Amino acid sequence: MSEAEKPKLFLVMKTPGPSWDPALERRKQVLWDEHAAYMDELAAAGTVVVGGPAGDGDEVLVLYDARDQEALQAILEKDPWTGTVLQIDSIVPWSIWVDGRNRPS
């Protein structure tokens, strides 16, 4: 597979935004149902590779498969939690050189 054919992966760290209520569990936050439905849609399409809370649970790491950073930005902007419940802390392009997820049984 050539470099041009390899998936473009981006590791995105998200942290609590201005609408995050620390008194509530993650699934009780405002717009949870809309956010969860959107993330499920992205996962079904293969756009979200893996994702979930990290560290002490305040941070979220999501690995996205997107054409380029501009396409990723458009994906992030459609999430009802972006800029509200969660804010984008960092976006790092990631080249996977070793991947044991698809190894034969």
Image (spheres, grey):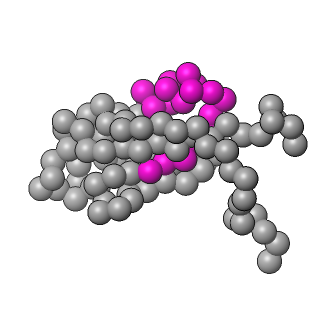
Residue 80 in view of the camera: no
Q: Position of residue 48 (x, y in %)?
A: 56, 46
Name the residue located 55 percent from the left edge and 54 percent from the top edge: 50
Q: Nearer the viewer, residue 32 or 47?
A: 47
Q: Position of residue 28 (x, y in %)?
A: 23, 54
Residue 49 in view of the camera: yes
Name the residue located 49 percent from the left edge and 53 percent from the top edge: 51
Which quarter of the figure has residue 45? top right
Name the residue located 58 percent from the left edge and 38 percent from the top edge: 93
Q: Is residue 62 magenta?
A: yes
Q: Is residue 30 magenta?
A: no
- With respect to residue 62, does 70 lie above or below? above
- With respect to residue 55, does 38 lie above or below? above
Q: Position of residue 105 (x, y in %)?
A: 80, 77
Q: Which residues are magenta?
A: 61-78
Q: Position of residue 22 (x, y in %)?
A: 15, 53
